[in-house]
Image: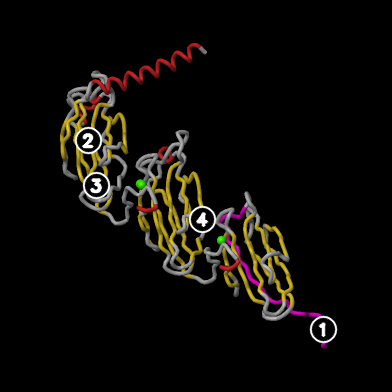
Amino acid sequence: MGIILKSVILVVSFFMAGLGMRGQLMADERLEEIVPNLNVIRSLEEKDQINMYKTAVNEKGYQNITLNFDETKKDQVKNGWTIKVYDENKKEIYKVEGVKTQFTTGNFSFVKDKIVYISIESATSGFLFMPKGVEYNLNFHTYSADDYESEPNNKYLNANEIETGSYIKGNLINSLDEDYYVCKVDANGYTELSFEILDFEPDKIGNGWDIEIYDKNKSLLYKEENIKKDTGFPKLPLVKGQEIYIRIKAKGSLLYVAPEEVEYKLQASLTKTDKWELEDNGSFSKANKLKGTLSGNILNDGDIDYFEFKAGKSGKYKISLNTGDNVDGEYRVEIFVKNKGKAVLKEQTKGDKSFTIKAKKGQKVWIKLSGVYGKSPIGNEYSLKYKAVKNIKKKIAKK
Ligand SMILES: [Ca+2]
Ligand SMILES: [Ca+2]
Ligand SMILES: [Ca+2]
């Protein structure tokens, strides 16, 4: 017990001393302006020396930084260099410590004209282990691209647009980075998103990405957590004029390893159809007209799909729900005739099921479909149809 306590105090005081040192002895910081895509060859001579560079992004696209050195000096590199990248307010946004080999960062995706600072310093504060006098070759490369995210896009307001039928590439530059995209739906139908991991490296992916999809009112439509492989998302049936927002982030906790610098590709496609339940329908008044067979899906525990039809004649109607095979989850079906306040039928089902109700000519029939909380059949495609039941008895009597 006593030993543990002591060591904690030791660590804390060491840390404090470190901070104090930093405050007292101002590091030897040299600022130099550099031009993208041009090498600068410099070295560190003192253990406190920080070579700071300032540059501006010269084109729309993505960027990376390379640090190289003469291979024959490998032994003199010792514990290597630390590279840090700062934004225009000198806020640190990227850091890699102990670079001892030829090195290339992941891709950054700063907007054009963005001011970026880069610092190179010794990875250790000790004189013995610093890469003293070893010339390094630093280059801030820029690559022109239209299909790459532009940082900063850490909120809805700066969401990068993905056009339906196209894709965008991006990455999380640190564990706090979030990437927002918007996709504008220009026809009734369903939108499908797919997420692909480019340069798959299991070690770097850690706990993976969290992806959330919101509608234009910023209500959550669907989410998927800990994504560690290429993933397709459920069909999102949306009316023309809807917008969907996609938020990509790492899990916000120290316990989780963020997939930093791992490039991903987010693709959006739109299929025009009037055979789908449109997702703007969380109320009786916005119920989808049921004609022929309509398909749909339950996107989350809160999703409710409403359908309606008008009885063409008095009699019985058979409503059939087809949930497909091996459904993992349960549907709640409620049917209302004329009166929205009271269901004439309430059932739960996993598998295909038909329901028969009576209605008089001209009466409205509503079908309310949702998941059962905690075990909703999220993302599963169902289809729904109805037909009038023929009165067989009468026919026999007439014969
Ligand atoms: Ca990003
Ligand atoms: Ca971002
Ligand atoms: Ca739905």
In the figure, is residue 281 to the left or right of 97? right
The mark that comes first in sequence, 4 or 3, is 3
Query: Mark 2 against mark 1, which lies toward the viewer?
Result: 1
- Whether pointer 3 and pointer 1 mark residues with C-beta atoms closer than 8 Å, the reply is no
Q: Mark 4 points at which residue?
A: 221
Q: Is residue 85 visible?
A: no
Q: Name the residue under label 3.
A: 114
The mark that comes first in sequence, 3 or 1, is 3
Place residue 352 in its image quadrant. Answer: bottom right
Q: How crowded is mark 4: few (under 14 residues within 10 Å), some or many (20 or more)?
A: some
Q: Mark 1 points at which residue?
A: 396
- Residue 396 x, y percent position in the rendering: 82, 83
The mark that comes first in sequence, 4 or 1, is 4
Query: Mark 3 against mark 2, which lies toward the viewer?
Result: 3
The mark that comes first in sequence, 2 or 1, is 2
State yes or no: residue 49 in magenta: no
Secondary structure of the residue carrying tag 4 is strand
Secondary structure of the residue carrying tag 2 is strand
- The answer for how far apart the CA atoms under marks 4 and 2 are is 46 Å
**Magenta range:** 376-399
Identify the residue at the far bottom of this view.
399
Q: Mark 2 points at which residue?
A: 68
- Residue 90 x, y percent position in the rendering: 26, 37
- Residue 103 x, y percent position in the rendering: 27, 36
- The answer for how far apart the CA atoms under marks 4 and 3 are is 34 Å
Secondary structure of the residue carrying tag 1 is helix
Q: How crowded is mark 1: few (under 14 residues within 10 Å), some or many (20 or more)?
A: few
At x 61% / y 55%, what residue is drawn? 377
- Residue 179 x, y percent position in the rendering: 38, 49
